[in-house]
Image: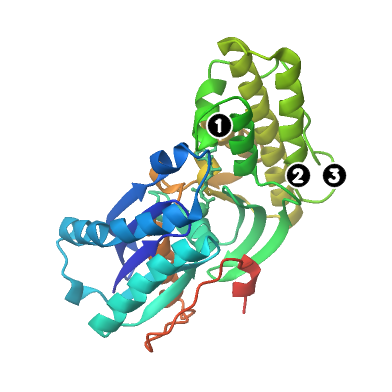
Amino acid sequence: MKVLGFESSCDETGVALVETRDVGPPRLLAEALHSQAAMHADYGGVVPELASRDHIRRVLPLTRQVLAQAGCTLAEIDVVAYTRGPGLAGALLVGAGTAVALAAALGRPALGVHHLEGHLLSPFLAEHAPRFPFVALLVSGGHTQLMDVKGVGDYRLLGETIDDAAGEAFDKSAKLLGLGYPGGPELARLAASGNPKAHTLPRPLLHSHDLDFSFAGLKTAVMTLARKLGPELSEQTAADIAAATQAAIVEVLVTKSLRALAATGRRRLVVAGGVGANHALRGALDRGCARIGAQVHYPPLALCTDNGAMIALAAALRLQHGLADVRSDGAFDVKPRWPLQELNP
Ligand code: KG4
Ligand code: ZN
């Protein structure tokens, strides 16, 4: 079975084709991605209306590219999947409308996918796929959650951020340091030449007994520190603040992930979402998990941030497990707000 997937929830247009196999997880046949980061950079963040219009411009050329790359015709597609939410309503509607129209024209069913389920299952596209059950650390621009995952479609929330997401903490701190958008990768690059011990920043909720996070106070602390050391920050001072910020975020994420493994008795951790591309986080999680004898799984680096492959994959896995809510009536909706746990039976 071949599944074509569309991702358009925020500022990346992603299209991908996966194929299910009798043994092992579905295989990625081809994928194409267009990032709008450069377009939004002038505004310091995503402009929803511009995002929607750009998705419209990109989605069909990317689809042709994917089909050509896979050597596949439209007639060979069995199901068309799209991100149904959460995300920007207008942006979601572009992928959903395209997918449902294409499915109707082909006489095939369409399937709406939860964006975070896509992230969460994306490590199944890695060379060493995880096995269920596992704890998932979901760290994206809008979400920071720890989930206990027993299988496809079985997600129990263990803890989440009570304010800003980890990606938001990276982005907002980067903005305070005058870095470009998106701030996470920029801050990580600058942090590489900084001393994380030059400054001590707060580790919010580090010692709380729950598995929740709070990152809003961190950006305030970064702002206060930058003002104290400013108004003009030398390259080295900015790098030191970046390193200290990254160290604070990483320590909280690692500590809570290890605590979640201990609390659930799981032996595997799956990390997904844009912040999962962060090298310092990966290094610290690798060391932490090795220390307690747990395995840690990541998606391939290029599939940490938003992409079509994870949407096609999540749809394929749902179909294989008989959990897919497919529609063939040409109707669709999008869900800008949509808690992942609502997927549980
Ligand atoms: O999952 P994602 O692509 O989009 C959402 O669904 O939100 O995550 C984007 C987030 C942004 O906050 C971005 O700054 C962050 O992931 N990010 C990083 C890195 N790469 C992306 N944060 C830290 N280090 C990175 N290398
Ligand atoms: Zn995402």
Which residue type does callout 1 highlight?
A: Gly
Q: Residue furthest bottom?
A: 329
- State the mark number for residue 208: 3
Question: Residue 191 location in percent, x, y?
Answer: 57, 22
Question: From mark 1 to mark 3, how far is it between C-alphas?
Answer: 24 Å
Circles 2 and 3: CB atoms closer than 8 Å: no
* Residue 193 falls left or right of residue 315: right
Which residue is the site of mark 2?
Answer: 214
- State the mark number for residue 297: none
The crowding category of the residue bearing disc 2, from other C-alpha atoms within 10 Å (few below 14, some 14 to 19, many at least 20), is many
- Res. 242 in view: yes
- Res. 316 in view: no
Q: How many marks?
A: 3
Q: Nearer the viewer, residue 292 or 100?
A: 100
Disc 2 Cβ-to-ligand 1 distance below 8 Å: no
Question: Residue 80 location in percent, x, y?
Answer: 33, 73
Q: Nearer the viewer, residue 281 or 35?
A: 35
Question: Residue 262 location in percent, x, y?
Answer: 73, 49
Which residue is the site of mark 1?
Answer: 283
